[in-house]
Amino acid sequence: MRENWDRFDAYLFDIDGTLLECVDAVHYFAFCDVLTTIAGRPMNLDGVTTHGNTDIGILRDALRQGGLPDEMWRDRLAEMRSQMATYVNARIEQVCARPHKAIHKALLHLRSRRAYLGVATGNLEAIGTIKLRSAGLFEYFQFAAWSDRHEIRRDVFAEALARVREDMGKDTSILIVGDTPADIEAAKYHHVPVLAVATGIFSAVELAACSPEICLNSFSDLMG
């Protein structure tokens, strides 16, 4: 299947670890800022699984780990999203997102084939958009599904898949592209093939163990 990776009608890309790497800590400290506000004491993400999670899921896991029951923060989610976005926007010049090697080439290739390109990410929209713009990748994508309304990654994918099928038809061929076992699990939940790329924290061996349809060390394996 690897040699046919570019034969799909539409592609859904994860952001962090897949398209780009953020070399700043602005997003991380935005989490700490809102968690501290909600808890009324200093909090961070120590011990919380972030890779493959969603921003809402990360907040949930951190607050539960910190002993805060859901009823203490559930009705403040809109406030929490807004506070995180405000924090990052105030430090937008500090955001430094670097596109992974060969990703520009891969996206240009897919656009030349008239593929429909979308983002399906655990990032909040306000933050993910800043990262894509910082990396020079925003203009490649025609639509996006964010985590603003979703705690679970497969629900983000469900939104993105529904958008593709609404725009292009229910028989549209779709490939999901991600860098974590969570991406692979969510793709399999929706019975959609997945390309796993070891550009994040998980090795190609670890990703291959989850049985993606395609597994690569990097996009350079495809584009040279």
Image (cartoon, rainbow, N blue to C red):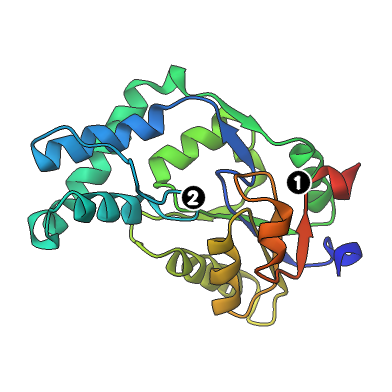
x%, y% of residue 152? 39, 65
Residue appearing at x 49%, y 71% in the figure: 158
Q: Could you say which is closer to the camera, residue 156 or residue 112?
A: 156
Q: Mark 2 points at which residue?
A: 51
45 relative to 137 in the view: left or right? left
x%, y% of residue 22? 54, 31
Upstream in sequence: badge 1 or badge 2: 2
Q: In this view, does 182 lie above or below 166?
A: above
Q: Name the residue under label 1.
A: 107
Q: Could you say which is closer to the camera, residue 144 or residue 187?
A: 187
Residue appearing at x 32%, y 41% in the figure: 45
Q: Quadrant of residue 161?
A: bottom right
Label 1 crowding class (10 Å Cα cut-off): few <14, some 14-19, many 20+? some
Q: Is residue 116 above or below residue 17?
A: below
Residue appearing at x 59%, y 71% in the figure: 187
Label 2 crowding class (10 Å Cα cut-off): few <14, some 14-19, many 20+? some
Give the number of marks. 2
Give the residue type that dot 2 points to: His
Dot 2: element: loop
Quadrant assignment for the N terminus: bottom right
Q: How far apart are marks 1 and 2 (CA)?
A: 23 Å
x%, y% of residue 50? 43, 48
x%, y% of residue 181? 58, 62
Dot 1: element: helix
Q: Which mark is nearer the camera, 1 or 2?
A: 2
Quadrant assignment for the C terminus: top right
